[in-house]
Amino acid sequence: MALKLTGTMHNYEWGHEELIAGLQGRTPSGEPEAELWFGAHPSAPALTSEGPLDEVIERESGERLPFLVKLLAAKKPLSLQAHPSREQARAGFARENAAGIPLGAAHRNYKDDNHKPELLIALTPFRAVAGFQPIERTLRLLRAFGVPRLAELERVLADASLDTAERLSRALKLAMTVDAAEAVAQRATELAAGDSEFAAVASNLAFIAREYPGDNGVVAALLLNHVSLEPGEALFLAAGNLHAYLSGMGVEVMANSDNVLRGGMTGKHIDTDELFSVLKFVPLDNPTTQLVDGFFNVPVDDFSVAPISGGEFVTGPAIVINTAGQLAVGGLALGPGEAAWVSAADKAVPVEGAGAAGFVVT
Protein backbone atom coordinates (compact mmCIF):
# COMPACT_ATOMS: atom_id res chain seq x y z
CA MET A 1 0.00 0.00 0.00
CA ALA A 2 1.34 3.42 -0.95
CA LEU A 3 1.35 6.20 1.64
CA LYS A 4 1.02 9.84 0.69
CA LEU A 5 3.90 11.99 1.91
CA THR A 6 3.44 15.44 3.38
CA GLY A 7 6.79 17.05 2.75
CA THR A 8 8.63 19.33 5.17
CA MET A 9 9.12 22.84 3.79
CA HIS A 10 12.34 24.77 4.39
CA ASN A 11 12.00 28.52 4.00
CA TYR A 12 15.62 29.45 3.32
CA GLU A 13 16.12 33.05 2.25
CA TRP A 14 17.31 32.08 -1.26
CA GLY A 15 14.06 30.28 -1.99
CA HIS A 16 11.44 31.28 -4.56
CA GLU A 17 8.07 32.51 -3.33
CA GLU A 18 6.02 31.08 -6.19
CA LEU A 19 7.59 28.13 -8.02
CA ILE A 20 6.72 25.25 -5.68
CA ALA A 21 3.31 26.73 -4.91
CA GLY A 22 2.66 27.14 -8.64
CA LEU A 23 3.62 23.53 -9.31
CA GLN A 24 1.23 22.35 -6.60
CA GLY A 25 -1.55 24.69 -7.73
CA ARG A 26 -1.91 26.49 -4.41
CA THR A 27 -1.71 30.06 -3.17
CA PRO A 28 1.88 31.04 -2.29
CA SER A 29 2.59 31.24 1.43
CA GLY A 30 4.29 34.62 1.09
CA GLU A 31 7.60 33.19 2.33
CA PRO A 32 10.56 32.02 0.25
CA GLU A 33 9.91 28.31 -0.29
CA ALA A 34 13.34 26.82 -0.94
CA GLU A 35 13.20 23.08 -0.36
CA LEU A 36 10.34 20.65 0.18
CA TRP A 37 11.75 17.46 1.68
CA PHE A 38 10.16 14.09 0.90
CA GLY A 39 12.30 11.71 2.87
CA ALA A 40 13.24 10.25 6.22
CA HIS A 41 16.13 12.42 7.40
CA PRO A 42 15.69 12.57 11.19
CA SER A 43 15.91 16.37 11.20
CA ALA A 44 12.88 16.80 8.93
CA PRO A 45 11.05 13.56 8.01
CA ALA A 46 8.02 13.66 5.73
CA LEU A 47 4.72 12.85 7.42
CA THR A 48 2.36 10.00 6.53
CA SER A 49 -0.99 8.81 7.86
CA GLU A 50 0.99 6.28 9.91
CA GLY A 51 3.46 8.76 11.41
CA PRO A 52 6.77 10.34 10.38
CA LEU A 53 8.42 8.46 7.53
CA ASP A 54 11.59 7.64 9.47
CA GLU A 55 9.48 5.94 12.16
CA VAL A 56 7.38 4.12 9.54
CA ILE A 57 10.54 2.72 7.93
CA GLU A 58 12.02 1.77 11.31
CA ARG A 59 8.90 -0.28 12.08
CA GLU A 60 8.85 -1.85 8.61
CA SER A 61 12.46 -2.85 8.21
CA GLY A 62 14.65 -1.40 10.94
CA GLU A 63 16.80 0.14 8.22
CA ARG A 64 17.73 3.70 7.30
CA LEU A 65 16.44 5.08 4.00
CA PRO A 66 19.61 5.71 1.97
CA PHE A 67 18.25 8.62 -0.08
CA LEU A 68 16.44 11.95 0.26
CA VAL A 69 14.12 13.50 -2.33
CA LYS A 70 13.43 17.24 -2.54
CA LEU A 71 11.73 19.86 -4.61
CA LEU A 72 14.21 22.76 -4.80
CA ALA A 73 13.32 26.27 -5.97
CA ALA A 74 15.95 29.02 -6.08
CA LYS A 75 15.26 32.69 -6.71
CA LYS A 76 18.83 33.70 -5.84
CA PRO A 77 22.10 31.78 -5.66
CA LEU A 78 22.65 29.23 -2.92
CA SER A 79 25.85 29.26 -0.90
CA LEU A 80 29.14 28.26 -2.49
CA GLN A 81 29.42 24.77 -1.02
CA ALA A 82 30.58 21.18 -1.13
CA HIS A 83 29.67 17.97 0.66
CA PRO A 84 31.94 15.44 2.40
CA SER A 85 32.68 11.86 1.47
CA ARG A 86 31.26 9.11 3.69
CA GLU A 87 34.58 8.74 5.54
CA GLN A 88 34.93 12.51 6.03
CA ALA A 89 31.34 12.76 7.28
CA ARG A 90 31.79 9.97 9.80
CA ALA A 91 34.98 11.53 11.15
CA GLY A 92 33.54 15.06 11.25
CA PHE A 93 30.27 13.99 12.87
CA ALA A 94 32.13 12.04 15.56
CA ARG A 95 34.54 14.92 16.14
CA GLU A 96 31.77 17.48 16.63
CA ASN A 97 29.80 15.11 18.85
CA ALA A 98 32.89 14.60 21.01
CA ALA A 99 33.29 18.38 21.21
CA GLY A 100 29.74 18.66 22.54
CA ILE A 101 28.47 20.84 19.69
CA PRO A 102 24.64 20.60 19.64
CA LEU A 103 23.15 19.19 16.43
CA GLY A 104 21.16 22.37 15.94
CA ALA A 105 24.06 24.76 16.52
CA ALA A 106 24.51 27.34 13.79
CA HIS A 107 28.27 26.74 13.65
CA ARG A 108 28.00 22.98 13.33
CA ASN A 109 29.36 21.54 10.06
CA TYR A 110 28.23 17.92 10.26
CA LYS A 111 24.54 17.16 10.92
CA ASP A 112 24.94 13.42 10.31
CA ASP A 113 27.53 10.80 9.38
CA ASN A 114 26.69 10.36 5.69
CA HIS A 115 28.06 11.56 2.38
CA LYS A 116 25.93 13.59 -0.03
CA PRO A 117 26.26 12.88 -3.75
CA GLU A 118 23.36 14.58 -5.52
CA LEU A 119 21.34 14.57 -8.74
CA LEU A 120 19.38 17.67 -9.86
CA ILE A 121 16.71 17.21 -12.55
CA ALA A 122 15.45 20.54 -13.91
CA LEU A 123 11.71 21.25 -13.94
CA THR A 124 12.23 24.82 -15.24
CA PRO A 125 15.26 26.41 -16.92
CA PHE A 126 17.93 25.97 -14.26
CA ARG A 127 21.35 27.58 -13.81
CA ALA A 128 24.26 26.39 -11.67
CA VAL A 129 28.00 26.59 -11.22
CA ALA A 130 29.22 23.05 -10.68
CA GLY A 131 32.68 21.57 -10.28
CA PHE A 132 36.06 22.96 -11.32
CA GLN A 133 36.18 23.40 -15.07
CA PRO A 134 39.30 22.31 -17.00
CA ILE A 135 42.11 24.79 -16.36
CA GLU A 136 42.53 25.82 -20.00
CA ARG A 137 38.87 26.81 -20.08
CA THR A 138 39.35 28.98 -17.00
CA LEU A 139 42.44 30.63 -18.44
CA ARG A 140 40.51 31.59 -21.59
CA LEU A 141 37.78 33.07 -19.40
CA LEU A 142 40.24 35.06 -17.27
CA ARG A 143 41.90 36.47 -20.39
CA ALA A 144 38.54 37.52 -21.76
CA PHE A 145 37.69 39.27 -18.49
CA GLY A 146 41.09 41.02 -18.40
CA VAL A 147 40.86 42.07 -14.75
CA PRO A 148 44.34 43.20 -13.61
CA ARG A 149 43.73 42.11 -10.01
CA LEU A 150 43.37 38.52 -11.24
CA ALA A 151 46.86 38.41 -12.79
CA GLU A 152 48.25 36.28 -9.94
CA LEU A 153 45.30 33.90 -10.21
CA GLU A 154 46.03 33.48 -13.92
CA ARG A 155 49.74 32.96 -13.24
CA VAL A 156 49.07 30.18 -10.71
CA LEU A 157 46.70 28.36 -13.04
CA ALA A 158 49.21 28.54 -15.89
CA ASP A 159 52.15 27.32 -13.77
CA ALA A 160 53.10 24.00 -15.39
CA SER A 161 55.57 23.26 -12.58
CA LEU A 162 52.57 22.53 -10.31
CA ASP A 163 50.26 19.56 -10.67
CA THR A 164 46.60 20.19 -11.43
CA ALA A 165 45.37 19.72 -7.85
CA GLU A 166 47.91 22.18 -6.48
CA ARG A 167 47.08 24.76 -9.13
CA LEU A 168 43.36 24.52 -8.40
CA SER A 169 43.86 24.61 -4.63
CA ARG A 170 46.10 27.68 -4.79
CA ALA A 171 43.79 29.35 -7.30
CA LEU A 172 40.74 28.86 -5.10
CA LYS A 173 42.55 30.29 -2.06
CA LEU A 174 43.49 33.33 -4.13
CA ALA A 175 39.97 33.66 -5.51
CA MET A 176 38.48 33.65 -2.01
CA THR A 177 40.87 36.29 -0.66
CA VAL A 178 41.86 38.64 -3.51
CA ASP A 179 40.32 42.12 -3.50
CA ALA A 180 38.66 41.73 -6.88
CA ALA A 181 34.93 41.10 -6.33
CA GLU A 182 33.87 44.59 -7.43
CA ALA A 183 36.15 44.57 -10.47
CA VAL A 184 34.85 41.15 -11.56
CA ALA A 185 31.26 42.32 -11.05
CA GLN A 186 31.79 45.40 -13.20
CA ARG A 187 33.47 43.45 -15.98
CA ALA A 188 30.77 40.76 -15.83
CA THR A 189 28.07 43.38 -16.31
CA GLU A 190 29.90 44.71 -19.37
CA LEU A 191 30.42 41.28 -20.96
CA ALA A 192 26.86 40.15 -20.21
CA ALA A 193 25.52 43.03 -22.29
CA GLY A 194 27.56 42.05 -25.36
CA ASP A 195 27.74 39.09 -27.72
CA SER A 196 30.94 37.54 -26.34
CA GLU A 197 31.11 33.74 -26.13
CA PHE A 198 31.29 34.31 -22.39
CA ALA A 199 28.10 36.39 -22.18
CA ALA A 200 26.13 33.62 -20.42
CA VAL A 201 28.90 33.08 -17.89
CA ALA A 202 29.17 36.83 -17.35
CA SER A 203 25.41 37.02 -16.81
CA ASN A 204 25.66 34.39 -14.06
CA LEU A 205 28.53 36.27 -12.41
CA ALA A 206 26.68 39.58 -12.60
CA PHE A 207 23.66 37.86 -10.97
CA ILE A 208 25.83 36.51 -8.14
CA ALA A 209 27.40 39.94 -7.63
CA ARG A 210 24.01 41.68 -7.44
CA GLU A 211 22.74 39.27 -4.82
CA TYR A 212 25.98 39.10 -2.81
CA PRO A 213 27.80 42.42 -3.38
CA GLY A 214 31.45 42.30 -2.37
CA ASP A 215 31.39 38.52 -1.82
CA ASN A 216 34.38 36.68 -3.28
CA GLY A 217 32.09 33.87 -4.39
CA VAL A 218 31.82 35.76 -7.66
CA VAL A 219 35.59 35.36 -8.15
CA ALA A 220 35.57 31.69 -7.17
CA ALA A 221 32.77 31.08 -9.69
CA LEU A 222 35.24 31.96 -12.46
CA LEU A 223 36.89 28.61 -11.73
CA LEU A 224 33.72 26.53 -12.08
CA ASN A 225 31.61 25.06 -14.88
CA HIS A 226 28.59 27.20 -15.72
CA VAL A 227 25.64 24.93 -16.46
CA SER A 228 22.27 25.76 -18.01
CA LEU A 229 19.67 22.99 -17.91
CA GLU A 230 16.37 22.80 -19.75
CA PRO A 231 13.43 20.92 -18.19
CA GLY A 232 14.19 17.21 -18.04
CA GLU A 233 17.97 17.69 -18.18
CA ALA A 234 20.08 16.81 -15.16
CA LEU A 235 23.42 17.27 -13.46
CA PHE A 236 25.19 14.99 -10.99
CA LEU A 237 27.76 15.96 -8.39
CA ALA A 238 29.76 13.50 -6.33
CA ALA A 239 30.94 14.48 -2.87
CA GLY A 240 33.78 17.00 -2.84
CA ASN A 241 32.71 19.10 -5.83
CA LEU A 242 32.45 22.85 -5.26
CA HIS A 243 29.14 24.21 -6.54
CA ALA A 244 26.24 26.61 -6.16
CA TYR A 245 22.79 26.41 -7.69
CA LEU A 246 21.80 29.82 -9.04
CA SER A 247 18.16 29.83 -10.12
CA GLY A 248 15.28 27.62 -11.15
CA MET A 249 13.29 24.65 -9.85
CA GLY A 250 14.11 20.98 -9.93
CA VAL A 251 13.82 17.61 -8.27
CA GLU A 252 16.90 16.94 -6.19
CA VAL A 253 17.83 13.42 -5.15
CA MET A 254 20.77 12.75 -2.85
CA ALA A 255 22.14 10.45 -0.24
CA ASN A 256 20.22 10.86 3.02
CA SER A 257 22.34 13.68 4.45
CA ASP A 258 22.26 17.36 5.39
CA ASN A 259 26.01 17.94 5.53
CA VAL A 260 27.06 21.22 3.88
CA LEU A 261 30.45 22.97 4.04
CA ARG A 262 30.14 26.58 2.91
CA GLY A 263 32.70 29.03 1.56
CA GLY A 264 30.68 32.13 0.68
CA MET A 265 27.50 33.61 -0.78
CA THR A 266 25.55 33.06 2.42
CA GLY A 267 24.67 34.47 5.82
CA LYS A 268 25.07 30.99 7.32
CA HIS A 269 28.16 29.52 8.95
CA ILE A 270 31.27 29.56 6.75
CA ASP A 271 34.25 27.31 7.50
CA THR A 272 36.75 27.60 4.65
CA ASP A 273 39.33 25.37 6.33
CA GLU A 274 36.84 22.51 6.62
CA LEU A 275 35.58 23.19 3.11
CA PHE A 276 39.10 22.88 1.69
CA SER A 277 39.56 19.61 3.60
CA VAL A 278 36.66 17.95 1.73
CA LEU A 279 37.15 19.44 -1.74
CA LYS A 280 38.32 17.41 -4.73
CA PHE A 281 40.74 19.59 -6.66
CA VAL A 282 40.10 17.71 -9.89
CA PRO A 283 38.55 19.24 -13.03
CA LEU A 284 35.06 18.07 -13.90
CA ASP A 285 34.75 18.31 -17.66
CA ASN A 286 30.96 17.96 -17.79
CA PRO A 287 28.71 17.77 -14.71
CA THR A 288 25.56 16.91 -16.68
CA THR A 289 24.26 13.33 -16.86
CA GLN A 290 21.99 11.41 -19.19
CA LEU A 291 19.46 8.59 -19.13
CA VAL A 292 20.99 5.16 -19.67
CA ASP A 293 18.62 2.21 -20.03
CA GLY A 294 15.82 4.30 -18.56
CA PHE A 295 17.74 5.54 -15.47
CA PHE A 296 19.82 8.64 -14.86
CA ASN A 297 23.48 7.69 -14.93
CA VAL A 298 24.71 8.21 -11.35
CA PRO A 299 27.81 6.31 -10.13
CA VAL A 300 26.58 5.72 -6.55
CA ASP A 301 24.67 2.93 -4.82
CA ASP A 302 22.56 5.19 -2.57
CA PHE A 303 19.80 5.74 -5.12
CA SER A 304 18.60 5.22 -8.66
CA VAL A 305 16.18 7.56 -10.44
CA ALA A 306 13.97 6.94 -13.45
CA PRO A 307 11.22 8.97 -15.16
CA ILE A 308 7.72 7.55 -14.69
CA SER A 309 4.48 8.47 -16.43
CA GLY A 310 2.07 5.58 -15.89
CA GLY A 311 1.46 2.07 -17.13
CA GLU A 312 4.34 0.85 -14.98
CA PHE A 313 4.95 -0.97 -11.70
CA VAL A 314 7.05 0.11 -8.73
CA THR A 315 8.67 -2.17 -6.18
CA GLY A 316 9.58 -0.69 -2.80
CA PRO A 317 11.33 0.75 -0.98
CA ALA A 318 10.72 3.74 -3.23
CA ILE A 319 9.51 7.32 -3.36
CA VAL A 320 7.41 8.40 -6.33
CA ILE A 321 7.17 12.13 -6.99
CA ASN A 322 4.75 13.59 -9.51
CA THR A 323 5.75 16.73 -11.41
CA ALA A 324 2.93 17.12 -13.98
CA GLY A 325 -0.60 15.86 -14.58
CA GLN A 326 -2.12 13.18 -12.36
CA LEU A 327 -0.46 9.99 -11.14
CA ALA A 328 -2.08 7.16 -9.21
CA VAL A 329 0.33 5.01 -7.18
CA GLY A 330 -1.41 1.86 -6.04
CA GLY A 331 -4.68 3.77 -6.31
CA LEU A 332 -3.32 6.74 -4.32
CA ALA A 333 -3.86 9.96 -6.32
CA LEU A 334 -0.94 12.37 -6.62
CA GLY A 335 -1.17 15.86 -8.06
CA PRO A 336 1.86 17.83 -9.29
CA GLY A 337 4.41 18.42 -6.55
CA GLU A 338 3.11 15.53 -4.43
CA ALA A 339 4.88 12.30 -3.48
CA ALA A 340 4.18 8.81 -2.16
CA TRP A 341 6.08 6.16 -0.22
CA VAL A 342 6.08 2.55 -1.42
CA SER A 343 7.37 0.24 1.32
CA ALA A 344 9.83 -2.62 0.97
CA ALA A 345 6.95 -5.04 1.56
CA ASP A 346 5.11 -3.77 -1.52
CA LYS A 347 5.78 -5.69 -4.72
CA ALA A 348 4.77 -4.48 -8.17
CA VAL A 349 2.61 -1.51 -7.15
CA PRO A 350 0.85 -0.19 -10.30
CA VAL A 351 1.37 3.41 -11.38
CA GLU A 352 -1.18 4.95 -13.73
CA GLY A 353 -1.11 8.40 -15.24
CA ALA A 354 -3.09 10.85 -17.30
CA GLY A 355 -0.76 13.35 -18.95
CA ALA A 356 1.57 12.72 -16.04
CA ALA A 357 5.30 13.00 -15.59
CA GLY A 358 7.30 12.19 -12.51
CA PHE A 359 10.18 10.20 -11.11
CA VAL A 360 10.60 7.05 -9.09
CA VAL A 361 13.53 6.92 -6.67
CA THR A 362 14.71 3.57 -5.36
Image (tube, rainbow, N blue to C red):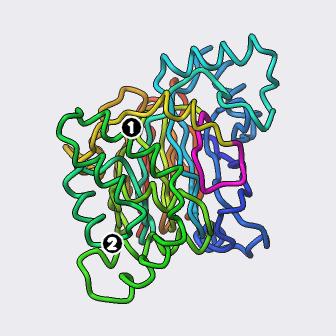
Of 2 and 232, the residue lying toward us = 232
In the picture provided, is 344 more to the left or to the right than 234?
A: right
Task: Name the spot of residue 170 as percent of width and height, x first.
Answer: 39, 40
* 247 over 38 or under it: above or below: below
Q: Amino acid at mark 2?
A: Phe
**Pick the front one: 89 or 148:** 148
Q: Position of residue 254 (x, y in %)?
A: 48, 39
**Camera-side residue: 253 or 169?**
169
Gap in angstroms between the C-alphas marked 2 and 1: 21 Å
Q: Nearer the viewer, residue 211 or 341?
A: 211
Screen quadrant of the N terminus: top right
> What residue is shown at x 45% (from left), y 82% (from top)?
189
Q: State the residue position of label 2.
A: 145
Whether 315 is drawn above or below 265: the answer is above
Q: Locate residue 22: give its quadrant.
A: bottom right
Q: Secondary structure at mark 2?
A: helix
Residue 334 in sight: no
Q: How many marks?
A: 2
Tell me the magenta residue range.
Answer: 258-269
From the viewer's perspective, is 45 left or right of 240?
right
Residue at 24% over, 34% down: 162
- Which amino acid lies under the numbered mark 1 shown in the image of this protein? Ser
Would you call the spot at circle 2 few (<14 residues within 10 Å), some (14-19), or many (20 or more)? some
Give whichever of discs 2 and 1 has the lower sequence position.
2
Please, is residue 156 above or below residue 23 in the view? Answer: above
- Residue bearing mark 1: 169
Name the residue furthest bottom.
194
Confirm whether residue 159 shows in the render: yes
Q: Is residue 175 left or right of residue 142?
A: right
Rendered location of residue 246, percent (x, y):
50, 64
Q: Which residue is at 35% across, 69% downward?
A: 230
